[in-house]
């Protein structure tokens, strides 16, 4: 039997708690495991994944990295996949990097154009740094793909760290 997460019954009166505990005990072990994975908010809001070990939820880093890929102008509809959550995640992760064609770059946030890239999830074609920095990561990535537009997206890393 898997233990009911205490957060589920926090703040409940005795009658409601007893009802929830009875419901929990009627669930199969597989259903309890699935509930635990779905219940924990961290599974939705951070780069962690839940793993059950000996009936306990253990959090492991989700092996993701931010990738940039040149896109065909006809595939612009795919930009709708870039969600508000991606922007929020990127702005909370100061050490996040992105990769384009095997080259890794830090994420610049120093100017409005950089903020727009993070909000839109794409590097405009032939990007020019407003500060005219030669080592601008957005400009270097743009040059790497011969000035093509780049769309950003998350994917699983090839090697676990």
Image (cartoon, rainbow, N blue to C red):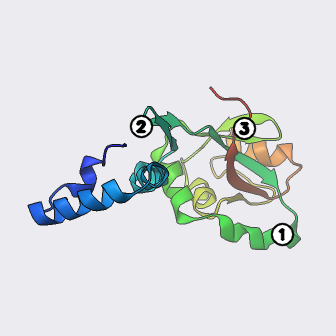
- Residues packed near mark 3 inside 10 Å, few (<14), some (14 to 19) or many (20 plus): few
Badge 3 marks a residue whose secondary structure is loop
Quarter of the picture holding the C terminus: top right
User: Residue drawn 74% across and 60% down?
Assistant: 124
Percent of width and height locating residue 130: 64, 52
Q: Which residue is under mark 2?
A: 55
Percent of width and height locating residue 119: 57, 62
- Residues packed near mark 1 inside 10 Å, few (<14), some (14 to 19) or many (20 plus): few
The answer to whether residue 81 of the structure is visible from this angle is: yes
User: Residue drawn 69% across and 53% down?
Assistant: 153
Do tag 1 and tag 2 residues touch (Cβ < 8 Å)?
no
Percent of width and height locating residue 158: 74, 34
Q: Which residue is under mark 3?
A: 134
Nearest to the eye among marks 3 and 2: give it: 2
> In the image, is residue 73 above or below residue 144?
below
User: Residue drawn 39% across and 57% down?
Assistant: 27
Lower position in the chain sequence, tag 1 or tag 2: 2
Nearest to the eye among marks 1 and 2: give it: 2
Total numbered labels placed on residues in the image: 3
Percent of width and height locating residue 71: 84, 60
Task: State left or right for residue 44 relative to residue 130.
Answer: left
Lower position in the chain sequence, tag 3 or tag 2: 2
User: Residue drawn 66% across and 29% down?
Assistant: 160
Do tag 3 and tag 2 residues touch (Cβ < 8 Å)?
no
Badge 1 marks a residue whose secondary structure is helix
Q: Which residue is under mark 1?
A: 75
- In this orientation, which residue lies closer to the viewer: 67 or 141? 67
- In this orientation, which residue lies closer to the viewer: 38 or 31? 31
Q: Quadrant of residue 8?
A: bottom left
- Residues packed near mark 2 inside 10 Å, few (<14), some (14 to 19) or many (20 plus): few
């Amino acid at each position: 039997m898997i233990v009911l997460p205490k957060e589920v019954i926090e703040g409940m009166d005795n009658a409601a708690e007893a009802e929830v505990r009875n419901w929990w005990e009627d669930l199969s072990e597989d259903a309890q495991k699935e509930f635990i994975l779905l219940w924990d908010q961290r599974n939705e809001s951070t780069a962690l994944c839940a793993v059950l070990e000996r009936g306990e939820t253990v959090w492991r880093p989700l092996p993701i990295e931010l990738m940039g890929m040149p896109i065909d102008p006809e595939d612009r509809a795919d930009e709708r996949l870039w969600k508000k959550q991606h922007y929020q995640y990127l702005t909370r992760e100061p050490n996040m990097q992105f990769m384009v064609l095997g080259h890794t770059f830090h994420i610049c946030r120093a100017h409005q154009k950089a903020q727009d890239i993070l909000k839109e999830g794409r590097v405009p074609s032939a990007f020019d740094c407003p500060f005219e920095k030669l080592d601008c990561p957005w400009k270097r990535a743009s040059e790497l793909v011969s000035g093509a537009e780049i769309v950003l997206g998350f994917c699983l890393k090839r090697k676990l760290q």
